[in-house]
Image (cartoon, rainbow, N blue to C red):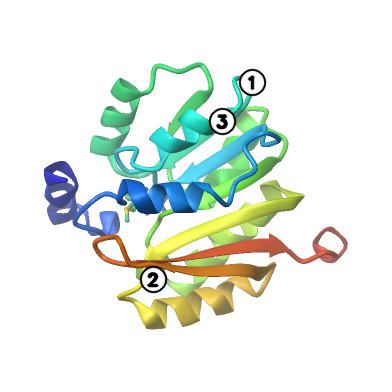
Amino acid sequence: MMAHAAQLLRDTSVASIAPTSSYCAKKISSLIAFESAKVIIEFGPGDGALTDILLKKMRSDAKLLLIETNPHFIDILKERYDDPRVVIVHDSAEKVSSICQKLDIMKADYVVSGIPFSFLSMQKKKQIIRSTASILKNDGSFIIYQALTAPLGGVNLKKALSICFDIVHKEMLLWNLPPLYVWEAKKFYDYELKN
Ligand SMILES: C[S@@+](CC[C@H](N)C(=O)[O-])C[C@H]1O[C@@H](n2cnc3c(N)ncnc32)[C@H](O)[C@@H]1O
């Protein structure tokens, strides 16, 4: 928790004073069908609050791609996860499509994002959302969790998501500092035809 707060002082895109609680991380991970998921991508893993749970539940032949911008968290993740299923990339989520290309990852079953969309411009939100849609399987899910304290951020995120995704599930998780909302989104059924 102290590491998180210290990083927030240096890097506002960390956007929270504490990692996600293990209760909430478990609730978020319950949206994933681990028995069939072969590729999961996590945007903004921070120091691994959700990553720990994903790795506990993932198949032994699945892959977890972690994309994180904060160099301090990158060092922590590299030290923490000596696991052949994990690939750690120090870069920004909007590059996910070219990162996957370089790594020979064709499509993902799930993208789980803790990045603070409400801090991003509409243009950047849309870039990340388009890039995410391009690497998700047709029946894949984009799972987003955000601080409940940014209601306007939620409205703008919904608008940005509506270029490629339908929100199919919404949940509020109060046992967190700050409380979170979680959305699961699916690509439009005719996304590939339109893009
Ligand atoms: C609210 S914290 C969540 C950390 C962790 N997932 C958790 O649940 O405790 C947001 C994280 O997203 C990272 N981040 C912010 N913008 C990003 C971007 N464009 N691409 C990848 N990571 C980003 C931050 O450095 C930070 O680690």
Callout 1: helix, strand or loop? loop
Q: Amino acid at mark 3?
A: Met
Residue at image coords 34%, 38%:
48
Q: Residues within 10 Å of mark 1 (few under 14, many from 20)?
A: few
Name the quadrant containing residue 3.
top left
Q: Which residue is mark 3?
A: 58
Choose between 57 and 71: the one closer to the eye.
Answer: 57
Q: Which residue is mark 1?
A: 61
Query: At 71% from the left edge and 40% from the top edge, which residue is drawn?
Result: 107
Q: Which mark is on residue 14? A: none
The CA span between labels 2 and 3 is: 29 Å
Count neighbours of disc 3 (C-alpha within 10 A) and say few if under 14, some if 14 to 19, many if 20 or more.
many
x, y percentage for residue 32?
A: 60, 46
Q: In the picture provided, is 4 more to the left or to the right than 110?
A: left
Residue 174's quadrant in the figure? bottom left
Q: Which residue is mark 2?
A: 118
